[in-house]
Image (cartoon, helix red, strand yellow):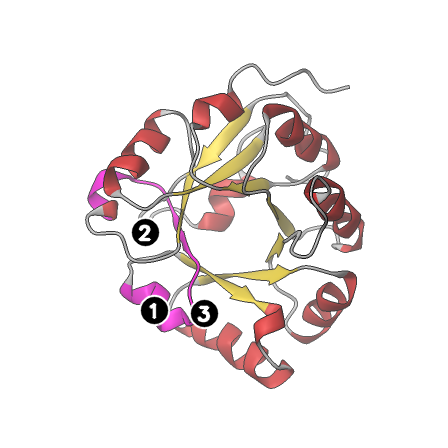
Amino acid sequence: MAPGRPLTGRVSILLRVTGSRRLSQAISEGDGISVLVQVAAAGAAARAEAQGAEGLVLDAPVPEVREASSLPILFRGRSPEEARAAGADAWILVTEREGEEELEALYRRAHDLGLECVVDVHDEAELASVLERIDPEIVLLSPRGARAGEALERVLELLPDLPAGKLAIAELRATTREEVAALERAGVDAVLVGPSDVSDLVGGLPPPV
């Protein structure tokens, strides 16, 4: 969400855009926070888009997903090559899995393949290191390791350390309309959620305070 963007209480949902639209564009355009929805079948992708989503998240290749939805695909896998083979537009690079040299090499490989790279961090030290070494445009704030019920709090603790101008995606696999509204008020650009009914997250959000 760009600095100074008015909060409207409206949520748009991220599903996939083919070629003409990048993931970064999908989550930075519009007035509300975007929602990225994990799907495992083409039918689920089509339903999510129909419910108002703006981006898809895949953990594995999904046959015919490109035909089912016109939105951007974010792929979670071990390599950018795997993401490209799955027809994705962007790839999640998990910081804690890689050493510093591997992190930089993977980031370059993703961009060489035409993918946007979303860099996953789960604590302040990882975020500081990533900003220094590769300075990514899009950062995924992960609550990995947070205690039960503290995922939202953990994400919001990381957010102030992200410089202005970066795009922030919060990962909350199980969330509510109220939590999505809290992320929007805090300035988060998008939220990554597990398989869910998108309309439950975007409809009737409480007004911002």
Seen in the image, is 132 located left or right of residue 38? Answer: right
Circle nearer the viewer, 1 or 3: 1
Q: Secondary structure at mark 1?
A: helix
Q: Secondary structure at mark 3?
A: helix
Q: Are marks 1 and 3 in contact (CB under 8 Å)?
A: no
Circle nearer the viewer, 1 or 2: 1
**Residue under the image location 45 percent in, 69 percent down:** 111
Q: Are marks 1 and 2 in contact (CB under 8 Å)?
A: no
Q: Is-magenta flag for residue 74?
A: yes
Magenta range is: 66-85
Seen in the image, is 32 located left or right of residue 66? Answer: right
**Residue under the image location 52 percent in, 81 percent down:** 105
Nearest to the observer: residue 103 or residue 76: 76
Measuring from the top left, give residue 82's x and y in whole percent. 34, 69
Q: Residues within 10 Å of mark 2 (few under 14, many from 20)?
A: few
Mark seen at residue 82: 1
Mark seen at residue 19: 2
Residue 47, placed above or below residue 113: above
Q: Residues within 10 Å of mark 1 (few under 14, many from 20)?
A: some
Measuring from the top left, give residue 65's x and y in whole percent. 25, 46
What's under tag 1, amino acid-wise? Glu
The part of the image, by quadrant, that contains residue 199 is top left
Measuring from the top left, give residue 152's x and y in whole percent. 70, 40
**Residue under the image location 68 percent in, 69 percent down:** 130
Q: Earlier in the sequence, mark 1 or mark 2?
A: 2
Q: Alpha carbon of mark 3 to alpha carbon of mark 2: how far?
A: 15 Å
